[in-house]
Amino acid sequence: MIRRPTLFIFLLLAVSSICPPAFSQSTQKTFVYGDALPDAPELSARGSYAIGVQTIEVVNKNQVDVLNYAKDSLARYDRKLTLEVWYPTSAPAAVISYDEVMGQNGNPNRPIIPFTFSGRATRKAAPLLKDGPYPLIIVSHGYTGSRYLMTYLTENLASKGYVVVSIDHMESTFRDAAGFPSTLLNRSLDDLFVLNEMARLSKDKSSFLAGLVNTDNTALVGYSMGGYGAVNVAGGGYSPQAVGLFGGMTGGSKALSVRMRGNAAFEASIDPRIKVIVAFAPWGMERGLWDAEGLAGIKIPSLFVAGSMDDVSGYEKGIKAIYEGAVNSDRYLLTYIDARHNVAPNPPPVEAMQPGLNIDEYLRYADSVWDMRRINNINQHFVTAFLGMHLKGMSDYKKYLDVPVESSAEVWTGFKPRTSIGLQLMHDAPEK
């Protein structure tokens, strides 16, 4: 016969084994994009600042409407850009929910499907001014994409004392994707406009950005078509072949010529406030959008990041060729061996794994060889080192970049034993 207390304990244990107690977020850590895995390299860890985030809208008025060129060669329109801005705050750390979509506007096989994912920031938190103004980082997504495509990196950099602004490029997001010529023309123009808007708002006493950001000390980070724009903004003027290709796609528009090498307006637009670029998988070289003369125009430090099996931008004749052609830049090329094009985005959301969805919803984020969380951590590490050196004068960070080309040769500085594998890091100084 079982005594009552013993029977009670027996039943409690039996129920617990079937229905284990739920743990709150305070007792069970939830993985959020950008969190460090156990094998994350040293500089991938978040910085000491809590993060605030705000959304703002800006309008670049009276721009060339290249998508309607065939109907009206003089067509103009206003480009409305939504920006997400992350920045240091003294507010308590918090988990935030971001509203995103998968799918692609205009594609019946990929309908727009809303979803949410978590980050670590506080919406509309008061900015921490006492340590500012902070260097500015402008982030430009791929085609298609959104301002939330790389939150693992934008949040991470803000926690290290940067103001990070990520652009929703009009006619190039999941929600509003339109003709490709808009992206070809407007990427670099959007980047420069946003830089000017951030400078204006930094002096506007009614803006939360007042006194918070130093736009004279700016980095531009771009992925895919964002990388295409970053290379151009850095001084890599497009080739005559690029202008011809653009004309053929638009029914004769020559609007891209203002971003061509040798064009006086292009040369005058090279902005000394932009100190460095980070270009993830920049698109265009395999299509002849640059030549040797154009790439020689890049004279600021550059970090290129690529997958050795990139089947969108290409590697040997694509990203690596841009790296090799930027002979006047102090430049690095980080390569993920056997990775394809997705060396920059957040990991795939769980919604992208639902049965019946177009596989492109998953492949928009995932790599079939690499764990995206691992790629995210490695990107955080190297981008932190590169930007810390050039925007904050942290010369001791150079040791993280002065490593053997092959990661298997020895353990790279900042990596845990047995974890620096599957990578290459090339470095070339400017030609004299």
Image (tube, rainbow, N blue to C red):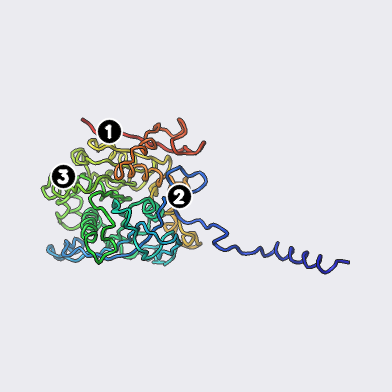
Left or right: 287 in relation to 150: left
Give the mark, 3 or 2, whose residue is nearer the N terminus.
3
Q: Point out the image quarter for the N terminus.
A: bottom right
Mark 1 residue type = Ala
Q: Amino acid at mark 3?
A: Arg
Rounded to the nearest angstrom, the CA distance separating label 3 from label 2 is: 36 Å
Q: Residue at x 14, y 52 (%)?
A: 258
- When the figure is inspected, residue 382 is found, relative to residue 214, above or below; the finding is above
Q: Are marks 2 and 1 in contact (CB under 8 Å)?
A: no
* Residue in view at x 13 percent, y 44 percent: 262
Regarding residue 317, the answer to whether it shows in the image is yes
**Residue closest to the far bottom:** 4
Residue 240: % across, % down: 16, 45
Mark 1 vs mark 3: in front: 1
Give the residue at x 12% y 47%. 263
Q: Earlier in the sequence, mark 1 or mark 3?
A: 3
Residue count near mark 3 (Cα–Cα under 10 Å), binned few <14, some 14–19, many ≥20: many
* Number of the label disc, if any, that sits on residue 372: 2
User: Does 59 sit above or below residue 335?
Assistant: below
- Circle 1 sits on which residue? 429
Q: Residue furthest left?
A: 264
Which residue is disc 3 drawn over? Answer: 261
Q: CA distance from mark 1 to mark 3?
A: 22 Å
| Residue 181 visible, this angle | no
- Residue 273 location (% of width, % of height): 21, 49
Q: Nearer the viewer, residue 138 or 8?
A: 8
* Secondary structure of residue under mark 1: loop
**Percent position of residue 79, x then y:** 22, 64
Q: Nearer the viewer, mark 2 or mark 1?
A: 1
Quadrant in the rendering for residue 81: bottom left
Callout 2: few (<14), some (14-19), or many (20+) C-alpha neighbours within 10 Å?
many
